[in-house]
């Protein structure tokens, strides 16, 4: 047996394993894209299916909107199976660019990841704090650089999905979408909705990491307990910061030539804070937060007719 097989480069093996895990995440993301598609339309306030009578957990009579699977089924009914995957290609391209570019930025800044110590090699408090600070710095750099480089593709992906509302065909391909955005909005159009997205993701990362570090240091000592704590903490902060996610999605479409981004469906906002205040005044900052049990209420009036739902628009496509 050749000796070079036994002396395989550990760093190369680690990189291969990371790319395999990344490829698996892309596969899962692609498989779940119809649900993400539905969530984007819900965040934009579009409700094409009438609410039905139901009861709350406390037994109160309420109107219930379709869950995420019923919503995805409606998209498939209108556009077919492949229509459920509109916006997937730029989403995957953005994810790959984010992965490659952010890692290069972190490495260029000398922020290589520090591996967790084994159970038989306990670290001192000073070493634990240094490890936490270094890894948090690296994660913030990865998050910020990854979001910035992938955001133009995110804008294209969201707008491709938002075309379902007005039945347009402005965003057919990545190159065609780039030309459309640059022609009518300039460079700034590629970064629509960037600020609230950055605030949401970075704040969630910093708050989650800091809370987990403090809990691990003073409360939970075992490794399994830290894993559960990390998952629960991330879920809690994601839920608290979710309104910024809704604002980002709305600002990504606002100002475009799409029907979904123009009055009367969406107001003309002067900035993301204006959008936040408007949605807050109408109690719509949690749109799409609940995907399985969705009570009707708190949606913008222009999206509804007197029957309580929005039919498919009958307008001419943009040329």
Image: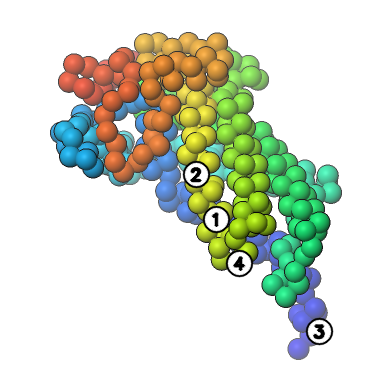
Question: Which one is earlier in the sequence, the residue at label 4 or at label 1?
Answer: 4
Image location (x, y in percent) of residue 297: 28, 25
Taking the image as shown, residue 241 lies to the left or right of residue 10, namely left
Residue situated furthest front in the rendering: 218
**Camera-nearest residue between 295 and 246:** 295
Task: Tell me if label 3 and label 4 are in contact, CB under 8 Å.
Answer: no
- Callout 3: SS: helix
Q: Mark 4 points at which residue?
A: 222
Any part of residue 188 in sight = yes
Write the residue at 62% across / 54% down. 215
Question: Which one is earlier in the sequence, the residue at label 1 or at label 2?
Answer: 1
Q: Mark 3 points at which residue?
A: 3
Q: Distance between the residues labelled 2 and 4?
A: 21 Å
Residue 39 image label: none
Q: How far apart are marks 4 and 1 (CA)?
A: 11 Å
Q: Is residue 42 above or below residue 84?
A: above
Tell me where residue 226 sits by quadrant: bottom right
Q: Which of marks 3 and 4 is in front?
A: 4
Task: Tell me if label 1 and label 2 are in contact, CB under 8 Å.
Answer: no
Mark 2 crowdedness (10 Å alpha carbons): few <14, some 14-19, many ≥20: some
Taking the image as shown, residue 59 lies to the left or right of residue 185, namely left
Please identify the quadrant where the C terminus is shown.
top left
Q: Mark 2 points at which residue?
A: 236
Mark 4 crowdedness (10 Å alpha carbons): few <14, some 14-19, many ≥20: few
**Camera-nearest residue between 133 and 3:** 133
Tell me where residue 105 sits by quadrant: top right
Q: Name the residue under label 1.
A: 229
Q: How far apart are marks 3 and 1 (CA)?
A: 44 Å
Q: In this view, does 27 lie above or below 87?
A: below
- Callout 1: SS: helix
């Amino acid at each position: 047996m050749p000796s070079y097989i036994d002396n395989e480069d550990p760093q190369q093996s680690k990189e291969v394993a990371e790319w395999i895990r990344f490829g698996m995440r892309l596969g899962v993301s692609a498989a779940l894209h119809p649900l993400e598609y539905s969530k984007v339309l819900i965040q934009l306030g579009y409700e094409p299916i009438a609410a039905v009578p139901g009861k709350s957990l406390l037994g109160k009579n309420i109107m219930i909107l379709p869950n995420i699977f019923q919503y995805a089924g409606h998209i498939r009914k209108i556009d077919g199976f492949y229509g459920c995957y509109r916006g997937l290609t730029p989403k995957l391209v953005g994810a790959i660019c984010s992965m490659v570019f952010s890692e290069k930025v972190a490495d260029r800044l000398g922020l290589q990841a520090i591996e967790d110590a084994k159970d038989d090699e306990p670290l001192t408090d000073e070493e634990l704090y240094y490890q936490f600070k270094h890894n948090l710095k690296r994660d913030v750099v990865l998050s910020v650089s990854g979001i910035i480089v992938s955001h133009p593709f995110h804008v294209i992906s969201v707008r491709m999905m938002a075309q379902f509302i007005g039945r347009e065909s402005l965003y057919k391909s990545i190159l065609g979408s780039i030309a459309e955005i640059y022609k009518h909005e300039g460079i700034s159009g590629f970064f629509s909705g960037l600020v609230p997205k950055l605030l949401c993701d970075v704040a969630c990362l910093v708050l989650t990491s800091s809370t987990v570090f403090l809990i691990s240091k003073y409360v939970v000592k075992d490794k399994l307990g830290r894993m559960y704590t990390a998952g629960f903490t991330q879920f809690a902060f994601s839920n608290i910061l979710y309104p910024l996610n809704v604002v980002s999605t709305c600002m990504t479409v606002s100002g475009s030539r799409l029907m979904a981004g123009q009055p009367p469906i969406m107001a003309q906002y002067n900035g993301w804070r204006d959008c936040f205040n408007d949605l807050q005044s109408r109690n719509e900052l949690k749109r799409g937060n609940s995907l399985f049990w969705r009570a009707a209420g708190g949606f913008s009036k222009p999206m509804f007719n007197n029957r309580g739902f929005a039919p498919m628009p009958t307008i001419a496509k943009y040329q």
